[in-house]
Image (tube, grey):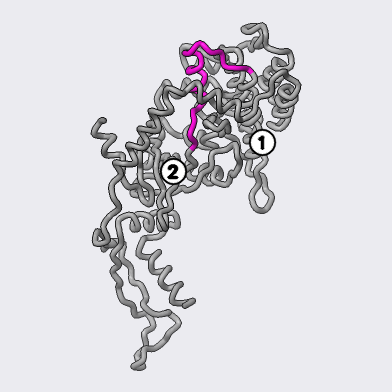
Amino acid sequence: MPLEEHKIAGQRFGKYVLLDRIAVGGMAEIFLARQEGLEGFEKTIVIKRIRPHLSSQKAFVNMFLNEAKLAAQLNHPNIVQIYDLGKIAESYFIAMEYIFGRDMRRIIPKADGMGIPFPMVYALKIASSVCEGLYYAHQKTDMYGGALHIVHRDVTPENIFVSFDGTVKILDFGIAKAANQVEQTRVGEIKGKLSYMSPEQCMGKVLDHRSDLFSLGVVLYEWITGFKLFTGESEVAILKSITDGKIYPPSYFKADVPEAVEHILMKALDKDRDKRYQSAWEMQYDLDQFLSQYEFTPSNIHLANFLKQLFSDELDEERKRLAARGSMLAPPPEPEEAMEIGEEDLEPIPLRPRAQRSSPGGTSSRGSSRVLTVDLKAADYEALKALADRNDLAVGALVGEIVASYLKFK
Protein backbone atom coordinates (compact mmCIF):
# COMPACT_ATOMS: atom_id res chain seq x y z
CA MET A 1 0.00 0.00 0.00
CA PRO A 2 1.46 3.42 -0.91
CA LEU A 3 2.82 5.51 1.95
CA GLU A 4 0.32 8.29 1.18
CA GLU A 5 -2.59 5.94 1.85
CA HIS A 6 -1.08 5.00 5.21
CA LYS A 7 -0.98 8.68 6.08
CA ILE A 8 -4.62 9.20 5.13
CA ALA A 9 -6.03 6.21 7.02
CA GLY A 10 -6.58 7.35 10.60
CA GLN A 11 -5.82 11.02 9.94
CA ARG A 12 -7.96 13.27 12.08
CA PHE A 13 -9.86 16.11 10.46
CA GLY A 14 -11.67 18.02 13.18
CA LYS A 15 -14.30 15.73 14.67
CA TYR A 16 -13.89 13.31 11.76
CA VAL A 17 -11.42 10.51 11.04
CA LEU A 18 -10.39 10.07 7.42
CA LEU A 19 -10.43 6.44 6.28
CA ASP A 20 -9.59 6.57 2.59
CA ARG A 21 -9.27 9.03 -0.27
CA ILE A 22 -11.89 8.11 -2.84
CA ALA A 23 -11.18 10.64 -5.55
CA VAL A 24 -9.30 13.82 -6.45
CA GLY A 25 -10.65 16.42 -8.87
CA GLY A 26 -9.82 19.92 -9.95
CA MET A 27 -12.02 21.38 -7.22
CA ALA A 28 -11.92 18.95 -4.30
CA GLU A 29 -10.57 15.82 -2.67
CA ILE A 30 -13.18 13.29 -1.58
CA PHE A 31 -12.62 11.07 1.45
CA LEU A 32 -14.45 8.24 3.11
CA ALA A 33 -14.54 9.23 6.77
CA ARG A 34 -15.93 8.32 10.16
CA GLN A 35 -17.78 10.62 12.50
CA GLU A 36 -17.40 9.79 16.17
CA GLY A 37 -19.61 10.75 19.08
CA LEU A 38 -20.61 9.92 22.62
CA GLU A 39 -20.90 6.36 23.93
CA GLY A 40 -19.08 4.85 20.96
CA PHE A 41 -21.35 6.45 18.34
CA GLU A 42 -19.92 6.07 14.82
CA LYS A 43 -21.24 7.05 11.41
CA THR A 44 -19.61 6.52 8.02
CA ILE A 45 -19.75 9.69 5.93
CA VAL A 46 -18.05 11.34 2.96
CA ILE A 47 -15.90 14.46 3.28
CA LYS A 48 -15.53 16.71 0.25
CA ARG A 49 -12.54 18.93 1.03
CA ILE A 50 -11.86 21.93 -1.20
CA ARG A 51 -8.40 21.97 -2.74
CA PRO A 52 -6.00 24.36 -0.94
CA HIS A 53 -5.32 26.58 -3.97
CA LEU A 54 -9.05 27.45 -4.14
CA SER A 55 -9.36 28.57 -0.52
CA SER A 56 -7.57 31.80 -1.42
CA GLN A 57 -10.04 32.61 -4.23
CA LYS A 58 -12.60 34.74 -2.45
CA ALA A 59 -15.15 34.69 -5.28
CA PHE A 60 -15.08 30.91 -5.41
CA VAL A 61 -15.25 30.47 -1.62
CA ASN A 62 -18.23 32.82 -1.28
CA MET A 63 -20.08 31.11 -4.11
CA PHE A 64 -19.25 27.66 -2.75
CA LEU A 65 -20.47 28.53 0.75
CA ASN A 66 -23.68 30.14 -0.49
CA GLU A 67 -24.56 27.23 -2.76
CA ALA A 68 -23.63 24.61 -0.14
CA LYS A 69 -25.87 26.34 2.42
CA LEU A 70 -28.78 26.07 -0.01
CA ALA A 71 -28.01 22.43 -0.78
CA ALA A 72 -27.84 21.64 2.95
CA GLN A 73 -31.53 22.55 3.22
CA LEU A 74 -32.49 19.72 0.88
CA ASN A 75 -33.75 16.61 2.63
CA HIS A 76 -35.14 14.05 0.19
CA PRO A 77 -34.66 10.29 -0.38
CA ASN A 78 -33.30 10.92 -3.88
CA ILE A 79 -30.77 13.60 -2.91
CA VAL A 80 -27.53 12.98 -1.04
CA GLN A 81 -27.88 14.71 2.33
CA ILE A 82 -25.35 17.31 3.48
CA TYR A 83 -24.66 17.05 7.22
CA ASP A 84 -22.04 19.69 7.84
CA LEU A 85 -20.32 22.64 6.20
CA GLY A 86 -17.28 24.28 7.70
CA LYS A 87 -13.62 25.15 7.68
CA ILE A 88 -10.80 23.39 9.48
CA ALA A 89 -7.45 25.15 9.34
CA GLU A 90 -7.38 26.46 5.72
CA SER A 91 -9.67 23.77 4.32
CA TYR A 92 -13.35 24.34 3.56
CA PHE A 93 -15.32 21.11 3.50
CA ILE A 94 -18.72 19.46 3.20
CA ALA A 95 -19.63 16.37 5.20
CA MET A 96 -22.30 14.37 3.39
CA GLU A 97 -24.19 11.10 3.37
CA TYR A 98 -22.23 7.97 2.43
CA ILE A 99 -23.92 5.76 -0.15
CA PHE A 100 -22.60 2.26 -0.82
CA GLY A 101 -22.99 1.92 -4.57
CA ARG A 102 -21.76 3.29 -7.89
CA ASP A 103 -22.40 6.32 -10.06
CA MET A 104 -23.80 5.90 -13.55
CA ARG A 105 -20.50 6.92 -15.13
CA ARG A 106 -19.18 3.57 -13.85
CA ILE A 107 -22.32 1.44 -14.14
CA ILE A 108 -22.93 1.78 -17.88
CA PRO A 109 -19.31 1.06 -18.94
CA LYS A 110 -19.21 -1.89 -16.52
CA ALA A 111 -22.25 -3.43 -18.20
CA ASP A 112 -20.82 -2.71 -21.68
CA GLY A 113 -17.51 -4.33 -20.72
CA MET A 114 -19.36 -7.49 -19.70
CA GLY A 115 -21.35 -7.52 -22.94
CA ILE A 116 -24.61 -6.76 -21.11
CA PRO A 117 -26.81 -4.08 -22.72
CA PHE A 118 -28.07 -1.79 -19.95
CA PRO A 119 -31.83 -2.48 -19.78
CA MET A 120 -33.97 0.41 -21.01
CA VAL A 121 -36.47 -0.04 -18.15
CA TYR A 122 -33.69 0.41 -15.58
CA ALA A 123 -32.57 3.60 -17.31
CA LEU A 124 -36.15 4.91 -17.24
CA LYS A 125 -36.61 3.96 -13.59
CA ILE A 126 -33.40 5.73 -12.60
CA ALA A 127 -34.43 8.82 -14.59
CA SER A 128 -37.83 8.82 -12.85
CA SER A 129 -36.14 8.86 -9.44
CA VAL A 130 -33.87 11.70 -10.58
CA CYS A 131 -36.96 13.64 -11.66
CA GLU A 132 -38.46 13.17 -8.21
CA GLY A 133 -35.37 14.57 -6.51
CA LEU A 134 -35.09 17.43 -9.00
CA TYR A 135 -38.74 18.41 -8.58
CA TYR A 136 -38.34 18.58 -4.81
CA ALA A 137 -35.26 20.80 -5.11
CA HIS A 138 -36.73 23.02 -7.82
CA GLN A 139 -39.83 23.66 -5.70
CA LYS A 140 -37.95 24.19 -2.42
CA THR A 141 -38.86 27.33 -0.49
CA ASP A 142 -37.42 29.07 2.54
CA MET A 143 -39.17 29.18 5.91
CA TYR A 144 -41.24 32.15 4.75
CA GLY A 145 -42.45 30.45 1.58
CA GLY A 146 -40.10 32.29 -0.76
CA ALA A 147 -38.75 30.25 -3.70
CA LEU A 148 -35.06 29.34 -3.41
CA HIS A 149 -34.71 28.90 -7.20
CA ILE A 150 -32.32 25.98 -6.82
CA VAL A 151 -30.92 24.64 -10.09
CA HIS A 152 -28.46 21.73 -10.10
CA ARG A 153 -26.55 22.85 -13.23
CA ASP A 154 -24.55 19.62 -13.45
CA VAL A 155 -26.90 16.70 -14.10
CA THR A 156 -24.36 14.22 -15.47
CA PRO A 157 -23.83 10.44 -15.11
CA GLU A 158 -21.19 10.99 -12.40
CA ASN A 159 -23.70 12.93 -10.28
CA ILE A 160 -26.37 10.23 -10.47
CA PHE A 161 -25.61 7.53 -7.93
CA VAL A 162 -27.29 4.15 -7.47
CA SER A 163 -26.81 2.30 -4.19
CA PHE A 164 -26.58 -1.45 -3.90
CA ASP A 165 -30.04 -1.44 -2.32
CA GLY A 166 -31.47 0.13 -5.50
CA THR A 167 -31.91 3.70 -4.24
CA VAL A 168 -31.10 6.51 -6.68
CA LYS A 169 -29.39 9.64 -5.34
CA ILE A 170 -28.40 12.96 -6.92
CA LEU A 171 -25.03 14.38 -5.84
CA ASP A 172 -23.53 17.87 -5.69
CA PHE A 173 -26.60 20.08 -5.81
CA GLY A 174 -25.71 23.64 -6.76
CA ILE A 175 -21.96 23.14 -6.44
CA ALA A 176 -21.53 23.56 -10.21
CA LYS A 177 -22.32 27.25 -9.82
CA ALA A 178 -19.28 27.61 -7.60
CA ALA A 179 -17.18 25.35 -9.83
CA ASN A 180 -17.74 27.81 -12.67
CA GLN A 181 -15.47 30.20 -10.77
CA VAL A 182 -12.55 27.76 -10.96
CA GLU A 183 -10.00 28.36 -13.67
CA GLN A 184 -7.70 25.43 -12.87
CA THR A 185 -10.24 22.70 -13.70
CA ARG A 186 -8.68 20.14 -16.01
CA VAL A 187 -9.59 20.41 -19.69
CA GLY A 188 -10.97 16.87 -19.84
CA GLU A 189 -13.32 17.60 -16.96
CA ILE A 190 -14.59 20.75 -18.66
CA LYS A 191 -15.30 18.93 -21.92
CA GLY A 192 -17.08 16.15 -20.04
CA LYS A 193 -19.33 18.63 -18.27
CA LEU A 194 -20.03 20.62 -21.43
CA SER A 195 -21.52 17.60 -23.17
CA TYR A 196 -24.51 17.64 -20.80
CA MET A 197 -25.21 21.38 -20.70
CA SER A 198 -28.42 22.95 -21.94
CA PRO A 199 -28.36 25.44 -24.84
CA GLU A 200 -29.18 28.32 -22.51
CA GLN A 201 -26.38 27.26 -20.17
CA CYS A 202 -23.91 27.25 -23.06
CA MET A 203 -25.01 30.77 -24.04
CA GLY A 204 -24.62 32.11 -20.51
CA LYS A 205 -28.30 32.89 -20.02
CA VAL A 206 -30.01 33.00 -16.63
CA LEU A 207 -30.95 29.42 -15.81
CA ASP A 208 -34.09 27.92 -14.36
CA HIS A 209 -35.15 24.37 -13.55
CA ARG A 210 -35.79 23.51 -17.21
CA SER A 211 -32.04 23.50 -17.83
CA ASP A 212 -31.72 20.47 -15.53
CA LEU A 213 -34.44 18.66 -17.49
CA PHE A 214 -32.54 19.13 -20.75
CA SER A 215 -29.39 17.74 -19.11
CA LEU A 216 -31.34 14.74 -17.80
CA GLY A 217 -32.70 14.21 -21.32
CA VAL A 218 -29.11 14.11 -22.65
CA VAL A 219 -28.12 11.60 -19.99
CA LEU A 220 -31.15 9.36 -20.60
CA TYR A 221 -30.65 9.51 -24.40
CA GLU A 222 -27.10 8.25 -23.89
CA TRP A 223 -28.17 5.43 -21.56
CA ILE A 224 -30.87 4.18 -23.94
CA THR A 225 -29.10 4.51 -27.29
CA GLY A 226 -25.48 4.05 -26.22
CA PHE A 227 -24.72 7.15 -28.29
CA LYS A 228 -23.22 10.30 -26.77
CA LEU A 229 -25.36 13.17 -28.02
CA PHE A 230 -22.93 16.10 -28.03
CA THR A 231 -19.25 15.63 -28.85
CA GLY A 232 -16.50 17.60 -30.55
CA GLU A 233 -12.79 18.09 -30.91
CA SER A 234 -12.83 21.21 -28.77
CA GLU A 235 -14.99 23.06 -26.26
CA VAL A 236 -16.19 25.41 -29.00
CA ALA A 237 -17.19 22.45 -31.18
CA ILE A 238 -19.18 20.89 -28.34
CA LEU A 239 -20.93 24.18 -27.56
CA LYS A 240 -21.82 24.63 -31.23
CA SER A 241 -23.19 21.08 -31.37
CA ILE A 242 -25.47 21.80 -28.40
CA THR A 243 -26.75 25.16 -29.63
CA ASP A 244 -26.92 24.52 -33.39
CA GLY A 245 -26.60 20.79 -33.99
CA LYS A 246 -29.46 18.51 -35.02
CA ILE A 247 -30.81 16.06 -32.45
CA TYR A 248 -31.80 12.83 -34.16
CA PRO A 249 -34.65 10.78 -32.68
CA PRO A 250 -33.25 7.90 -30.57
CA SER A 251 -34.78 5.37 -32.97
CA TYR A 252 -32.26 6.61 -35.56
CA PHE A 253 -29.56 4.81 -33.54
CA LYS A 254 -31.68 2.11 -31.95
CA ALA A 255 -34.68 1.01 -33.94
CA ASP A 256 -36.50 -0.75 -31.07
CA VAL A 257 -36.91 2.37 -28.89
CA PRO A 258 -40.65 2.58 -28.12
CA GLU A 259 -42.49 5.57 -29.59
CA ALA A 260 -43.58 6.79 -26.13
CA VAL A 261 -39.97 6.78 -24.88
CA GLU A 262 -38.85 8.65 -28.00
CA HIS A 263 -41.52 11.28 -27.35
CA ILE A 264 -40.29 11.74 -23.74
CA LEU A 265 -36.70 12.17 -24.85
CA MET A 266 -37.42 14.59 -27.69
CA LYS A 267 -39.64 16.74 -25.47
CA ALA A 268 -36.96 16.92 -22.75
CA LEU A 269 -34.35 17.79 -25.41
CA ASP A 270 -36.24 20.61 -27.12
CA LYS A 271 -33.79 23.49 -27.48
CA ASP A 272 -36.64 25.94 -26.84
CA ARG A 273 -37.17 25.66 -23.10
CA ASP A 274 -40.76 26.87 -23.43
CA LYS A 275 -41.52 23.70 -25.45
CA ARG A 276 -39.68 21.43 -23.03
CA TYR A 277 -41.19 19.76 -19.99
CA GLN A 278 -42.07 22.65 -17.69
CA SER A 279 -41.42 20.71 -14.51
CA ALA A 280 -39.61 17.56 -13.43
CA TRP A 281 -42.97 16.25 -12.20
CA GLU A 282 -44.36 16.33 -15.76
CA MET A 283 -41.41 14.35 -17.06
CA GLN A 284 -41.60 11.86 -14.18
CA TYR A 285 -45.32 11.37 -14.82
CA ASP A 286 -44.71 10.37 -18.45
CA LEU A 287 -41.86 8.06 -17.45
CA ASP A 288 -43.96 6.35 -14.77
CA GLN A 289 -46.96 6.05 -17.09
CA PHE A 290 -44.83 4.19 -19.63
CA LEU A 291 -43.26 1.92 -17.01
CA SER A 292 -46.63 1.05 -15.48
CA GLN A 293 -47.90 -0.18 -18.86
CA TYR A 294 -44.72 -1.93 -19.96
CA GLU A 295 -44.34 -5.71 -19.82
CA PHE A 296 -41.82 -5.41 -16.96
CA THR A 297 -41.80 -2.71 -14.29
CA PRO A 298 -38.61 -2.91 -12.21
CA SER A 299 -38.53 -2.30 -8.46
CA ASN A 300 -35.61 -1.17 -6.30
CA ILE A 301 -34.93 -4.83 -5.57
CA HIS A 302 -34.57 -5.63 -9.27
CA LEU A 303 -32.19 -2.71 -9.72
CA ALA A 304 -30.21 -3.71 -6.62
CA ASN A 305 -29.81 -7.30 -7.78
CA PHE A 306 -28.70 -6.17 -11.23
CA LEU A 307 -26.00 -3.90 -9.74
CA LYS A 308 -24.78 -6.58 -7.33
CA GLN A 309 -24.35 -8.98 -10.23
CA LEU A 310 -22.49 -6.37 -12.28
CA PHE A 311 -20.07 -5.51 -9.48
CA SER A 312 -19.86 -8.90 -7.76
CA ASP A 313 -16.12 -9.00 -8.49
CA GLU A 314 -15.58 -5.70 -6.68
CA LEU A 315 -17.87 -5.95 -3.66
CA ASP A 316 -15.88 -8.42 -1.54
CA GLU A 317 -12.62 -6.66 -2.36
CA GLU A 318 -14.11 -3.29 -1.37
CA ARG A 319 -15.43 -4.58 1.94
CA LYS A 320 -12.03 -6.07 2.78
CA ARG A 321 -10.28 -2.82 1.87
CA LEU A 322 -12.58 -0.75 4.08
CA ALA A 323 -12.14 -3.20 6.95
CA ALA A 324 -8.37 -2.89 6.55
CA ARG A 325 -8.63 0.92 6.66
CA GLY A 326 -10.61 0.67 9.89
CA SER A 327 -7.96 -1.54 11.51
CA MET A 328 -5.25 1.02 10.71
CA LEU A 329 -7.01 3.90 12.44
CA ALA A 330 -4.90 5.84 14.88
CA PRO A 331 -6.05 5.37 18.49
CA PRO A 332 -7.74 8.36 20.09
CA PRO A 333 -5.36 10.76 21.89
CA GLU A 334 -4.52 9.87 25.48
CA PRO A 335 -6.12 12.17 28.09
CA GLU A 336 -2.82 13.91 28.78
CA GLU A 337 -2.39 14.81 25.09
CA ALA A 338 -3.93 18.24 24.97
CA MET A 339 -3.66 21.40 22.97
CA GLU A 340 -3.51 24.75 24.67
CA ILE A 341 -5.25 27.61 22.98
CA GLY A 342 -2.56 29.78 21.45
CA GLU A 343 -1.86 33.21 22.84
CA GLU A 344 -3.11 34.80 19.63
CA ASP A 345 -6.55 33.32 20.31
CA LEU A 346 -6.76 34.37 23.96
CA GLU A 347 -9.10 37.17 24.89
CA PRO A 348 -10.16 38.32 28.36
CA ILE A 349 -12.93 36.07 29.67
CA PRO A 350 -15.01 37.43 32.58
CA LEU A 351 -15.06 35.05 35.55
CA ARG A 352 -18.28 36.52 36.94
CA PRO A 353 -21.41 38.02 35.37
CA ARG A 354 -20.85 41.54 34.05
CA ALA A 355 -23.96 42.70 35.86
CA GLN A 356 -22.21 42.12 39.20
CA ARG A 357 -20.93 45.57 40.16
CA SER A 358 -18.80 44.92 43.22
CA SER A 359 -16.70 42.26 44.83
CA PRO A 360 -17.33 40.97 48.37
CA GLY A 361 -14.78 43.51 49.64
CA GLY A 362 -16.80 46.35 48.15
CA THR A 363 -14.36 47.14 45.33
CA SER A 364 -16.00 47.79 41.98
CA SER A 365 -15.25 45.07 39.41
CA ARG A 366 -16.82 46.82 36.42
CA GLY A 367 -14.46 46.46 33.44
CA SER A 368 -12.03 44.16 35.28
CA SER A 369 -11.33 40.67 33.96
CA ARG A 370 -8.98 37.74 34.19
CA VAL A 371 -7.47 35.52 31.54
CA LEU A 372 -8.38 31.85 31.71
CA THR A 373 -6.15 29.31 29.92
CA VAL A 374 -7.97 26.13 28.91
CA ASP A 375 -6.34 22.82 27.91
CA LEU A 376 -8.16 21.04 25.10
CA LYS A 377 -7.64 17.85 23.15
CA ALA A 378 -6.53 18.55 19.60
CA ALA A 379 -9.78 17.24 18.09
CA ASP A 380 -11.89 19.32 20.50
CA TYR A 381 -9.90 22.44 19.68
CA GLU A 382 -10.34 21.91 15.93
CA ALA A 383 -14.09 21.44 16.39
CA LEU A 384 -14.25 24.61 18.51
CA LYS A 385 -12.21 26.55 15.96
CA ALA A 386 -14.44 25.37 13.12
CA LEU A 387 -17.48 26.60 15.05
CA ALA A 388 -15.78 29.93 15.70
CA ASP A 389 -14.86 30.32 12.03
CA ARG A 390 -18.44 29.70 10.96
CA ASN A 391 -19.52 32.54 13.27
CA ASP A 392 -16.66 34.89 12.30
CA LEU A 393 -15.22 34.88 15.83
CA ALA A 394 -11.83 34.24 17.36
CA VAL A 395 -11.75 31.05 19.41
CA GLY A 396 -11.18 33.02 22.63
CA ALA A 397 -14.16 35.27 21.93
CA LEU A 398 -16.38 32.25 21.32
CA VAL A 399 -15.29 30.60 24.57
CA GLY A 400 -15.87 33.92 26.36
CA GLU A 401 -19.43 34.10 25.08
CA ILE A 402 -20.10 30.48 26.09
CA VAL A 403 -18.79 31.01 29.63
CA ALA A 404 -20.57 34.36 30.00
CA SER A 405 -23.85 32.81 28.86
CA TYR A 406 -23.43 29.91 31.28
CA LEU A 407 -22.77 32.21 34.22
CA LYS A 408 -25.65 34.46 33.25
CA PHE A 409 -28.21 31.68 33.32
CA LYS A 410 -26.67 29.48 35.99
Magenta segment, which residues?
A: 99-120
Amino acid of disc 1: Tyr
Furthest-bottom residue in this view = 362
The image quarter containing residue 131 is top right
Q: Is residue 354 above or below residue 295?
A: below
Q: Is residue 371 above or below residue 45?
A: below
Compared across the picture, whether 242 is left or right of 380 comes to right
Q: How many numbered marks have been drawn onto this rendered protein structure?
A: 2
Can residue 117 be seen at all in this image of the molecule?
yes
In the image, is residue 195 part of the stretch drawn in magenta?
no
How far across and down, in percent of the image, does residue 350 sit? 37, 76
In the image, is residue 105 part of the stretch drawn in magenta?
yes
Q: Residue at label 1?
A: 135
Q: Residue at label 2?
A: 44
Q: What residue is rendered at 65% in x and 53% in y?
A: 143
Q: What residue is rendered at 43% in x and 33% in y?
A: 182
Q: Distance between the residues labelled 1 and 2?
A: 28 Å
Front-most of 97 and 185?
97
- For residue 318, the mark is none
Nearer the observer, disc 1 or disc 2? 2
Compared across the picture, whether 183 is left or right of 224 comes to left
Amino acid of disc 2: Thr
